[in-house]
Amino acid sequence: MVSANVRDALATFVAERDWAQFHSPENLAKSITIEAGELLECFQWSTDAAADRVTEELADVLTYCLLLAERMGVDPDEIVLDKLAVTRAKYPAEKARGRSAKYDRL
C-alpha cells in the first residue's frame, strides 16, 4: 500500500527539519484529527467539494497517519490487512452486501 519511496521521502522531509522531536503519538493523533476536520470542512456546505482541496487535505491526513504508524513501530499495510480480516468476520458479504447496518444488527 505505502511504497518505500513515500516512506523514505517522508522520513527525509521530517529529518531535514528536525521535526521528529515533536512527533509524539499524542501530537500525531491530534494532528490526524485536526487534518480530518479540515478534510470534512471541504464538504461543509456542499457535497460537491473541490477535488484539489480534498486531495490536499487527504494527503495531510495520510501523512500524519504514516508518521504515527512509524512512531508506533507498526507497518501500515499489515495493520490495515489485519483490521480488514477482523471487519470481514464481523460483516460477512452474504449478510452485509448493500446494507449499512451495524454488525450486531445483520
Image (cartoon, rainbow, N blue to C red):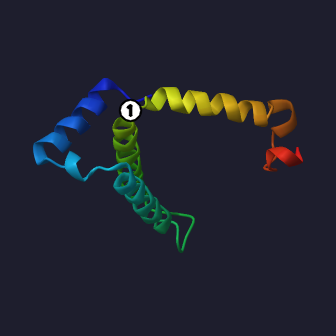
| Quadrant position of residue 83 | top right
Identity of the residue drawn at 15% across and 40% down: 15
Q: Amino acid at mark 1?
A: Gly
Number of disc labels: 1
x, y percent for residue 6 = 29, 32
Q: Which residue is mark 1?
A: 73
Which is nearer the eye, 49 or 7? 7
* In-image side of 99 versus 53 (left or right): right
x, y percent for residue 78 = 50, 26
Which is nearer the eye, 69 or 39? 69
x, y percent for residue 26 = 39, 54
Indicate the secondary structure of the residue bearing disc 1: loop
Quadrant in which the C terminus is drawn = top right
Is residue 52 placed above or below 106 in the rendered structure? below
x, y percent for residue 18 = 13, 47
| Quadrant position of residue 11 | top left
Identity of the residue drawn at 36% across and 52% down: 28
* In-image side of 8 versus 97 (left or right): left
Is residue 102 placed above or below 71 in the rendered structure? below
Identity of the residue drawn at 19% across and 49% down: 19
Residue sitting at the far bottom: 45
Quadrant in which the N terminus is drawn = top left
Crowding near the residue tagged with mark 1, few <14, some 14–19, many ≥20 C-alpha atoms within 10 Å? few
Identity of the residue drawn at 43% across and 28% down: 75
* In-image side of 8 versus 63 (left or right): left
* In-image side of 76 versus 80 (left or right): left
Is residue 45 placed above or below 27 in the rendered structure? below
| Quadrant position of residue 33 | bottom left
